[in-house]
Image (cartoon, grey):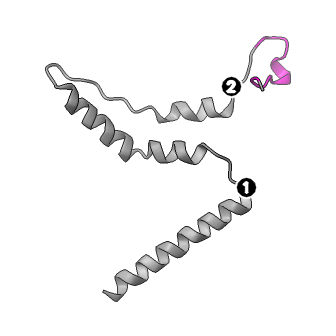
Amino acid sequence: MGPAVNPRFKDSGIIEKPLWQVWRWDFLAEVRVQEGEPLENALRRFKRKVQQEDIIKEVKRHSYYLKPGEKRRVKAALARKRNRKKARKEQD
């Protein structure tokens, strides 16, 4: 299945990008290597930045489709898990 063509732009040759291409570019982590800095340090900074910005989590979330009912069940399960954890902490 190719990219979608918007009827407004049909004659102009403009093609809309698929959704995955649009959201994917919002999550670019960038680290500049300073002069004389070892590559291992820059790689460590890059990994930390990717982890802090939850890029991996977001990519995994978009890697498959969840039906609305499934989303609600997952959301409810996470809420139950949070509440159990909160109750455990309050007991201590």
Amino acid type of the residue that numbered disc 1 sits on in the rendered structure: Lys
| Residue 86 percent across, percent down from the top left | 42, 78
Q: Which quadrant of the figure has residue 48?
A: top left
Q: Residues within 10 Å of mark 1 (few under 14, many from 20)?
A: few
Q: Residue at x 80, y 22 (%)?
A: 5
In the rendered image, the quadrant that contains the C terminus is bottom left
Q: Residue at x 66, y 60 (%)?
A: 71
Q: Which residue is mark 1?
A: 67
In-image side of 70 versus 6 (left or right):
left
Height in image: 31 above or below 55? above
- Indicate which label's residue lies in the foreground, 1 or 2: 1
Q: Residue furthest top?
A: 12
| Residue 11 percent across, percent down from the top left | 85, 11
In-image side of 23 versus 16 (left or right):
left
In-image side of 9 versus 46 (left or right):
right
Q: Residue at x 58, y 70 (%)?
A: 77
Q: Which residue is mark 2?
A: 17
